[in-house]
Image (spheres, rainbow, N blue to C red):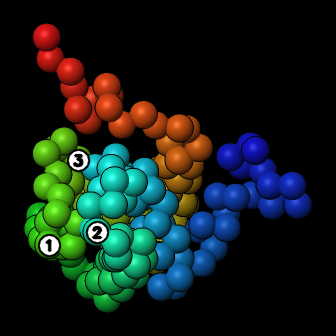
Amino acid sequence: MSVTNLTNGTDLLDQYFSDKSLDGVKKIVRLILNSWPCYQFAIKNQLGGSQTAIKDNWFSDVLSEHIFKHSDLYTYELSEWIEEIIYNEFDTISEDNTLDSTADLLIKMSNWLLGRGKTSVEEAKTKFRENVEKLLAMNSKKVRIFGTNLYPIRK
């Protein structure tokens, strides 16, 4: 499937950008969580125990609501908030240096979607489109966890 065109001829990226509500933020959060190797490792390995799937859905929802309600979030604040939850709920510590960049991307993409900040609508849409394309491309690939940069093999 092409990233930009669905079978009905609509632009997949426009579907992400057109929903400027909590539901739109939920789509972005889910897309980013599905692209974050550390988080996906925790989900795939059931590090949240028998309730991993339920915790995954819960976390996606509360993260979306948190970002939607707090228009003035800083990256470090969101990073700390996420770090505490993934440690307590998924027994996971992000040691791959992606937590801050993931939090930053969550804030930026949500702000672009909701029209927050100083970025013009067209610039926000362009940046949003570029990032959604990258995330969709990452999600469409089958990622092997071991042997990747997440867990480098040292000789």
Seen in the image, is 153 located left or right of residue 18? left
Question: Which one is closest to the eye, mark 2 or mark 3?
Answer: 2
Which of disc 1 and disc 2 is earlier in sequence? 2
Where residue 88 appears, x then y in whole percent? 14, 72
Q: Which mark is residue 88?
A: 1
Question: Which one is closest to the eye, mark 3 or mark 1?
Answer: 1
Which of disc 1 and disc 3 is earlier in sequence? 1
Q: Residue at x 54, y 60 (%)?
A: 125
Determine whether 144 is above or below 122 in the image.
Answer: above
Q: Which mark is residue 23?
A: none
Where residue 18 appears, x then y in whole percent? 63, 73
> Which residue is under mark 2?
49
Farthest residue in the right direction?
A: 8
Question: Which one is closest to the eye, mark 2 or mark 1?
Answer: 2
* Quadrant of the snapshot with the N terminus: top right
Q: Residue at x 31, y 25 (%)?
A: 147
Q: Is residue 100 visible?
A: no
Instruction: Give SS at disc 3.
Output: loop
**Kind of residue at badge 1:** Asn
Determine whether 100 is above or below 115 in the image.
Answer: above
Foreground: 71 or 141?
Answer: 141
